């Protein structure tokens, strides 16, 4: 427990950075297309690593990727990839960096085709958050599996079912707060 005595999800009980993220962002329904895209890119970087590490470097990621503005990132070429691989403030995975650039292009292609990213994402859950089972242990979901496949069809990469499920939790599309967590009923 924390000093304010509210019960949180287990993963956010002992670390101040994770607690602040949990209390103010995680699971809060996000409807802004660019913000959703940023969260998906960060979840891709998190694959195989701790979320705390990504959170602690989030500002460095934002700086390195021009505020996660797809219009800019889509234009990155080999020069920028080299600069990103040398940037000690971010995760220097060539595969993940190249995926962000590809995903910026896929995001823009959707927009150019008249498809709003946030609308597309929220349509996958019929416009309202799906309630998880409250156990706090799920790493996949039917909704995440389906959205992962849809994103891949649109040219996205590093969007496997586990990454997409975690992103849906973070973006409030799936409410996976634990049953006893004070945030479980937020927005109901």
Image (spheres, helix red, strand yellow):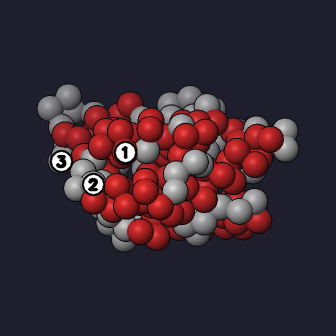
Of residues 15 and 45, the one drawn nearer to the viewer in this rendering: 45
How crowded pointer 1 is (Cα within 10 Å; few <14, some 14-19, many 20+) is rated as some
Q: Position of residue 144 (x, y in %)?
A: 64, 61
Residue tagged by mark 3?
14
The relative height of residue 75 versus residue 183 in the rendered view (above or below) is below
Q: CA distance from mark 3 to mark 2?
A: 30 Å
Q: CA distance from mark 2 to mark 1?
A: 8 Å
Query: Looking at the image, is mark 2 or mark 1 earlier in the sequence?
Result: 1
Of residues 9 and 31, the one drawn nearer to the viewer in this rendering: 31
Of helix, strand and loop, which one carries label 2?
A: loop
Q: Residue at x 14, y 32 (%)?
A: 3
Residue tagged by mark 1?
64
Q: Residue at x 58, y 48 (%)?
A: 75
The relative height of residue 112 versus residue 32 in the rendered view (above or below) is below
Number of on-image labels: 3
How crowded pointer 3 is (Cα within 10 Å; few <14, some 14-19, many 20+) is rated as few
Query: Looking at the image, is mark 3 or mark 2 earlier in the sequence?
Result: 3
Q: On the image, which quarter does residue 157 sit in?
A: bottom right
Q: Quadrant of the C terminus?
A: top right
Q: Residue at x 28, y 35 (%)?
A: 20
Residue tagged by mark 2?
87
Of helix, strand and loop, which one carries label 1?
A: helix
């Amino acid at each position: 427990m924390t000093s304010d005595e509210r019960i949180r999800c287990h993963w956010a009980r002992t670390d101040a950075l994770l607690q602040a993220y949990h209390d103010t962002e995680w699971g809060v329904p996000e409807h802004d297309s660019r913000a959703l895209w940023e969260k998906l890119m960060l979840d891709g970087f998190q694959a195989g690593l701790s979320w705390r590490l990504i959170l602690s470097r989030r500002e460095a990621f934002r700086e390195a990727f021009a505020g996660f503005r797809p219009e800019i990132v889509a234009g990155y070429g080999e020069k920028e990839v080299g600069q990103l691989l040398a940037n000690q403030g971010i995760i220097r995975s060539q595969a993940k960096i190249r995926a962000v650039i590809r995903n910026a292009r896929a995001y823009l292609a959707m927009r150019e085709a008249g498809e709003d990213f946030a609308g597309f994402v929220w349509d996958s859950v019929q416009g309202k958050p799906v309630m998880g089972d409250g156990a706090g242990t799920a790493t996949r979901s039917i909704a995440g599996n389906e959205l992962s496949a849809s994103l891949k069809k649109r040219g996205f990469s590093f969007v496997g079912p586990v990454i997409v499920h975690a992103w849906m939790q973070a973006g409030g599309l799936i409410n996976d707060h634990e049953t006893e967590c004070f945030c479980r009923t937020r927005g109901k």
